[in-house]
Image (spheres, helix red, strand yellow):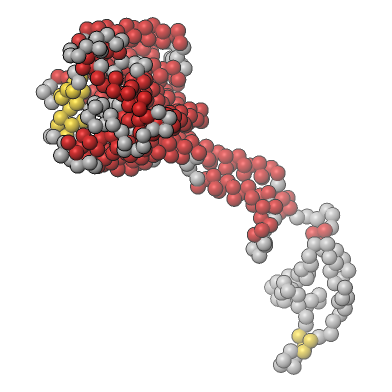
């Protein structure tokens, strides 16, 4: 260690004038003063001795430094960045800033990724299942794909736009959306604008554009049920059947009744499931739901009995008259029978993508209601299991978003969408497997159908907006909580 002399000799500058040695901090030597400024001691690092032989003030006890200055030290600008993780404050601030700028969480991307996979998978299967029918309709082999792809190109950006809307927006549009969609459904059943197919009048044709208002009513119910049940929960009225059943089954039941007049029993069942699912996940007691549930089941049975078309489907489901060579029941057995044969032909590994035999005009609605049969034939049991697994993953994403929801409206609307998408997929697959009679509901996100695809994507976009909203609302709180912890620690 080199010992510095107490009184070093003056250095001579290049100009020949003696100058005094100064410290790196720019302070003058003891005894030298500058007018208007105080003399400061040479800067000495902590733990070293000054030239006068005394320790630096930072190491002496009883110093008069402020408490804030002792608790927080500004990091050096030239400090090595590799040492940053060792500083608790710096690492904490860096992690918290990442949380602030990252609005989307894992639930958001889980739901979005599963949805996009099902849509893309559906486009592939629509191409395979509709190629023959599209060619026979002079639209080319890719006619069905181009039409479904156009709706997908509209629906996916629309879903992302909807996912950016705040919760307050859905409160404002709840009543208008329900009234508008019910008015359009009224035009279907009460005017000449309605179009029917398969014994059901559920299409509206305006200016050459044909769509299903009943699919729009599903989205409107999802929004409206979340808003109305959130109000009832805020007023502690969920245990009073008058305050729950009158608005839900009065207004919501009226919307379902408009669809029932059109004769679409399958859609009515899905909409009834949306109503009961929203009530259940809102916290309404089961004993209050028992009576309306029994009334709904009795009404569905009565509607099925009084309709000749539905009775024919039920008789074909019971295999009554399916062995006859002609007749209404024999013709109605054609579709479920060839659907079963398609599944049996696929086996475990399937016959290969695009190699289906049932799609060659043997299986009606091969690209719509019975697309699951084409999946089973071409991709086999493994392909069916993949589809089932993706819908299970979709349900898991819905449940996670419901669990993290901070408002009753977000929880109820997410539950309604889950009952809609997952319940409709369950009904469609059950029909193809022969568990239920033919009800005419498509497989969500996979079957061909523009209105069904658009409304399903909008509904999922609503749930994505809840996932973003909960994440964004919790992020600042986490940041401030961790900041206060670090302040206390300091």
In this rendering, does residue 152 appear at all? yes
Q: Is residue 75 above or below residue 276?
A: below
> Residue 344 occupies which quadrant of the picture?
top left
Left or right? Give the position of 207 relative to 1: left
Residue furthest bottom as drawn: 16
Residue furthest left as drawn: 192
In this rendering, does residue 272 appear at all? no
Q: Where does the image place residue 210, in percent across and percent down from the top left?
A: 18, 31
Report the front residue among 442 and 12: 442
Q: Is residue 490 above or below residue 185?
A: below
Q: Quadrant of the N terminus?
A: bottom right
Q: Where does the image place residue 23, in percent across and percent down from the top left?
A: 76, 75
Left or right? Give the position of 106 relative to 433: right
Report the front residue among 398 and 429: 429
Q: How many marks?
A: 0
Q: Where does the image place residue 380, in percent across and percent down from the top left?
A: 40, 31
Please tell me which residue is depicted at 51% across the width and 28% down the height of the picture.
403
Report the front residue among 225 and 352: 352
Please tell me which residue is depicted at 72% across the width and 50% down the height of the picture.
71
Please tell me which residue is depicted at 17% across the width and 36% down the height of the picture.
136
Please tell me which residue is depicted at 30% across the width and 13% down the height of the picture.
317
Q: Where does the image place residue 100, in percent across and percent down from the top left?
A: 52, 45
């Amino acid at each position: 260690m080199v010992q510095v002399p107490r009184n070093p000799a003056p250095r001579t500058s290049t100009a020949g004038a003696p100058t005094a040695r100064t410290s790196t901090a720019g302070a003058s030597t003891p005894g030298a003063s500058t007018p208007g400024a105080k003399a400061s001691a040479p800067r000495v690092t902590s733990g070293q001795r000054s030239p006068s032989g005394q320790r630096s003030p930072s190491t002496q006890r009883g110093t008069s430094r402020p408490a804030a200055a002792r608790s927080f030290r500004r990091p050096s600008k030239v400090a090595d960045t590799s040492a940053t993780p060792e500083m608790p404050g710096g690492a904490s601030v860096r992690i918290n800033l990442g949380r602030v700028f990252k609005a989307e969480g894992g639930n958001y991307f889980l739901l979005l990724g599963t949805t996009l996979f099902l849509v893309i998978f559906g486009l592939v299967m629509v191409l395979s299942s509709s190629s023959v029918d599209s060619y026979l309709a002079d639209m080319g082999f890719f006619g069905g794909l181009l039409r479904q792809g156009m709706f997908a190109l509209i629906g996916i950006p629309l879903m992302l736009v909807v996912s950016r809307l705040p919760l307050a927006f859905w409160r404002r549009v709840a009543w208008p959306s329900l009234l508008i969609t019910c008015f359009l459904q009224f035009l279907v059943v009460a005017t000449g604008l309605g179009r029917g197919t398969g014994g059901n009048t559920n299409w509206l044709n305006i200016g050459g554009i044909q769509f299903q208002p009943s699919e729009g009513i599903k989205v409107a119910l999802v929004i409206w049920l979340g808003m109305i049940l959130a109000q009832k929960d805020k007023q502690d009225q969920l245990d009073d059947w008058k305050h729950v059943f009158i608005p839900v089954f009065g207004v919501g039941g009226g919307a379902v009744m408009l669809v029932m007049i059109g004769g679409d029993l399958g859609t009515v069942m899905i909409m009834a499931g949306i109503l009961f699912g929203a009530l259940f996940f809102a916290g309404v007691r089961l004993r209050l739901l028992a009576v309306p549930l029994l009334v709904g089941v009795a009404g569905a049975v009565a509607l099925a009995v009084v309709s000749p078309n539905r009775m024919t489907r039920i008789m074909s489901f019971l295999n009554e008259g399916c062995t006859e060579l002609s007749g209404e029941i024999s013709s109605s057995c054609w579709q479920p029978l060839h659907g079963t044969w398609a599944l049996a032909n696929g086996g475990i590994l399937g016959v290969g993508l695009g190699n289906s035999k049932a799609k060659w005009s043997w299986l009606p609605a091969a690209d719509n209601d019975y697309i699951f049969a084409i999946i089973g034939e071409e991709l086999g049991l493994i392909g069916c299991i993949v589809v089932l697994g993706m819908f299970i993953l979709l349900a898991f994403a819905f449940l996670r978003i419901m669990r993290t929801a901070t408002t009753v409206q977000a929880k109820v609307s997410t539950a309604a969408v889950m009952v809609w998408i997952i319940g409709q997929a369950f009904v469609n697959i059950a029909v193809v497997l022969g568990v239920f009679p033919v009800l005419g509901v498509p497989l969500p996100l996979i079957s061909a159908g523009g209105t069904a695809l658009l409304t399903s994507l909008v509904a999922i976009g609503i749930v994505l907006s809840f996932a973003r909203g909960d994440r964004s609302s919790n992020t600042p709180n986490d940041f401030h909580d961790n900041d206060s912890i670090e302040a206390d620690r300091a």
